[in-house]
Structures are given as structure tokens and as C-alpha cells.
């Protein structure tokens, strides 16, 4: 094969590696650099060079071209979702942001509203109506909780869009939630807590975790970061009182006035904290002496429950058990709000209603035996 003309050789570049190996490249102005692999001066080398001159190289290595990220078109559902996720969620807890982003991105991938299989993310959001939102909800119909969470996420996004003038109405208005007959997370019984503590006795990390969950009522996202910085002492008529104060991650950023849980450290928890043998700020740390992530603590609790023969139990079930116990012992809805950091009264009233039903049932069950109400009894 004849050698190329001198005018083409000027686009050849040579470099030498630190190991003394010679490398050759062909690069014309404005084009990507192409690696020539054959030894210089051989017939195969000139074949590669000829291919490179016409951008036909299939043996050389080209520099990867940077491609710009394709942005969604204005007015599409994906565009609206991006606007919402960028502008409206700055004040939400990180875990909530991740959850909403995941839900809305999944909705963007839905093709159930198009006969041609077009993604909802590529379609205009302005034509969406009540029946379309119901169809999107029903795609998760087998899991009512996920379906209702999807509905809430869409509705919240459109409420924001109406507020800032990006949408004229909320098509999710009046779309009903799917009835969920599940009771959600199992609330641990006192027997199950005792079984856990029997498997994980005092002095173990699992014991400390159970006592923190049990006697603070905190969510796992707050338990993972609870530490010495949240403790303080006040003087009372009965002497010094140790307390803890923490702003829940999930709800504090949503309120004009920040929510804070401020409660006494109960004796069983104080005793467990005294047994901590490290100086880290957070009470619960990993084997590598680092604070747990929320996911990491959740996985660890899962392992500890499994080891105790309680595969149906979870960390959230401890919090739920505390709410049930407090309500059955007479705590009011407002007291539960303060104890558990809830922001909606109906969350607390759910537990007080259940407790009241149980009390009334206990008082009324004797009627099943035909006994009459005794004079003066209540």
C-alpha cells in the first residue's frame, strides 16, 4: 500500500509513555483523536491511517464525545416534576426528598395513558383529568399504601403548580384513596419486647437500641442521630431532671414554628445510657465506630429481630407499640402529639379511639353473659 502524502502526515502525533512505549494518534482540526495501534511504518499502520483520515476507523480508539443531557420540553409532565423537585422541596427532610423523587420519576415512566406507548413524562400535563389520575393510582392497586402515596405525591405537586401559576387546576382533586384494610406495621406486644430483650440482654448494642426506641418514641431517622448533644438537665422540686430535646427530621422543616420533642429521660433509658462505653456524640454506633445511617440502622434492627425469632417485627413497630401503650394508659391526643412529634391531630386520635374502644369493650363484654348493669356502676 502506498504511503500517504506528506500533507496527511502532519496530523500524526506521537507520544512516549513513561515505560518508553511509542503511541501514534491521528487528529485533524475539530475532530476526535484516533489511536493507531499498528506498529509505525508497517502496511497495517498506513491502512489504519487511511481509515482515520475518512473517519472510518474501526481499530483505533477515539476520545468519547460528550453528549448534553436531554432536557424535558416545557409543558411536559417530566418538566413539571423537575420544576417541583427543584424548587419546592428544599425545605423537606432528605429522606422525604428521595422518596418523592423516586415516586414522581416512576410516574413519568408510565405508559398507561397512551395507546402508542408514549411515556407520561413526554406528554403535556395540561390535559390530565381526574380519570387519568385514577388510572395512574390504580397501576399500584395491588399495594394500596403505594397507590395512595403516589396519589398524594401527584396531588401535592399539582397544588404547588397551581400556587405558583404553572397549572390552572389540580386534576388529582376528588380522586379517592384506595381503602387499605392493612393495619400497617405490627405493633410489638410486651411479650415480644421481652423476647427481644431475652435474646439481646443488657450490655448489648441491640438492648440499647430497643431501650432508646421504647422510651423515646422516636422515628428511626431521629434515633440514628440521637446523642449527648440532645441531653440537658433542669432543676425541679424533686431534684435534677435529665431530659432530651430533638427536632424530628421528618416534620420540623414543614412547620412555620419548628416541632421539637422535649421529654424526660425515663429511668430505664437513663440506666441503658449509663452503660455506653464510647465517647461519640451519637449513642448508637457501628462496629467501625461511626454513626449509623438510617438505612444501616434499619438493616441492623432487622437482623436483631430475626435473631430473636421475631421476623414480623420492625423498629417502627416499637414506636407504634409505645403509642398504643400510652393511649391505653390514658394519654390524650394532644399529649401523643407532643410525645411522638406528629403534626396532625388525626394521627394521635387514631390511637386514642382504639384505646377508647378497648376500654368500652372491656366494660360492656359482661352483657354477653346476660348480666344486668349493677346499680351505681358506670
Image: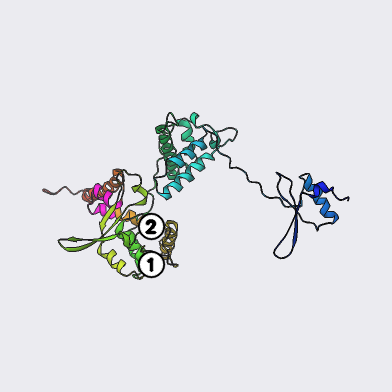
Give the residue displayed 56% in from the left and 39% down from the top.
71
Residue 188's disc is none
The residue located at (51%, 35%) in the rendering is: 77
Which is the main secondary structure of the residues drawn in magenta? helix
Q: Which residue is mark 2?
A: 315
| Relative horizontal placement of residue 181, taking residue 239 as reference (left or right) | right
The foreground one among 372 and 320 is 320
Q: Which residues are magenta?
A: 324-340
Residue 134 in view in this figure: yes
Label 2: state its secondary structure: helix
Q: Quadrant of residue 146?
A: top left
97 relative position to 232: left or right: right
Q: Position of residue 244 (x, y in %)?
A: 28, 58
- Residue 175 in the magenta stretch? The answer is no
Cα–Cα gap, marks 1 and 2: 14 Å
Spot occupied by residue 199 in the image (x, y as percentages of width and height): 38, 68
State yes or no: residue 335 in magenta. yes
Q: Which residue is mark 1?
A: 205
Looking at the image, can residue 142 be seen?
Answer: no
Which residue is located at x 46 percent, y 35 percent? 134
> Which residue is the extreme one toward the right?
2
Viewer-proximal residue among 77 and 175: 77
Name the mark nearer the viewer: 1 or 2: 1
**Which quadrant holds residue 21?**
bottom right
Secondary element under disc 1, as helix, strand or loop, is helix
> Which circle's residue, 1 or 2, is located before the other in the chain?
1
Colour scheme in use:
rainbow
Question: CB under 8 Å between callouts 1 and 2?
Answer: no
Which class describes the residues within 10 Å of circle 2: few (<14), some (14-19), or many (20+)? Answer: many
Amino acid at each position: 500500500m502506498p504511503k500517504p502524502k506528506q500533507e496527511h502526515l502532519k496530523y500524526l502525533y506521537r507520544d512516549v509513555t513513561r515505560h518508553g512505549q511509542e503511541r501514534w494518534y491521528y487528529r485533524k482540526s475539530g475532530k476526535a483523536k484516533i489511536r493507531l495501534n499498528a506498529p509505525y511504518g508497517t502496511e497495517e499502520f498506513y491502512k489504519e491511517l487511511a481509515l482515520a483520515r475518512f473517519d472510518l476507523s474501526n481499530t483505533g480508539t477515539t476520545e468519547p464525545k460528550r453528549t448534553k443531557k436531554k432536557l424535558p420540553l416545557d409543558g411536559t409532565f417530566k418538566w413539571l416534576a423537575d420544576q417541583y423537585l427543584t424548587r419546592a422541596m428544599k425545605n423537606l427532610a432528605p429522606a422525604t426528598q428521595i422518596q418523592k423523587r423516586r415516586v414522581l420519576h416512576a410516574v413519568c415512566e408510565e405508559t398507561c395513558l397512551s395507546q402508542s406507548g408514549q411515556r407520561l413524562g413526554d406528554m403535556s400535563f395540561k390535559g390530565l383529568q381526574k380519570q387519568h389520575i385514577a388510572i395512574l393510582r390504580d397501576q399500584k392497586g395491588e399495594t394500596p399504601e403505594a397507590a395512595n402515596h403516589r396519589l398524594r405525591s401527584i396531588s401535592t405537586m399539582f397544588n404547588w403548580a397551581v400556587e405558583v401559576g404553572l397549572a390552572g387546576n389540580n386534576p388529582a382533586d376528588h380522586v379517592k384513596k384506595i381503602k387499605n384494610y392493612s393495619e400497617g406495621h405490627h405493633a410489638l406486644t410486651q411479650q415480644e419486647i421481652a423476647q427481644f430483650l431475652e435474646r439481646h440482654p443488657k450490655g448489648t448494642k441491640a438492648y440499647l437500641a430497643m431501650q432508646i426506641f421504647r422510651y423515646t418514641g422516636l422515628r428511626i431517622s431521629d434515633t440514628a442521630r440521637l446523642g449527648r448533644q440532645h441531653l440537658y438537665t433542669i432543676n425541679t422540686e424533686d431534684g435534677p431532671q435529665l431530659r432530651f430535646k430533638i427536632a424530628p427530621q421528618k416534620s420540623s422543616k414543614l412547620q412555620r414554628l419548628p416541632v421539637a420533642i422535649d421529654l424526660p429521660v425515663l429511668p430505664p433509658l437513663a440506666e441503658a445510657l449509663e452503660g455506653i462505653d464510647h465517647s461519640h456524640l451519637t449513642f448508637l454506633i457501628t462496629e467501625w465506630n461511626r454513626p449509623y445511617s438510617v438505612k444501616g440502622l434499619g438493616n441492623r434492627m432487622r437482623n436483631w429481630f430475626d435473631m430473636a425469632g421475631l421476623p414480623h417485627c420492625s423498629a417502627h413497630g416499637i414506636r407504634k407499640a409505645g403509642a398504643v401503650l400510652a393511649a391505653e394508659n390514658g394519654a390524650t391526643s394532644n399529649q401523643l402529639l407532643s410525645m411522638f412529634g406528629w403534626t396532625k391531630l388525626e394521627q394521635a386520635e387514631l390511637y386514642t379511639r382504639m384505646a377508647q374502644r378497648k376500654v368500652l369493650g372491656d366494660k360492656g363484654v359482661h352483657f354477653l353473659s346476660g348480666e344486668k348493669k349493677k346499680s351505681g356502676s358506670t
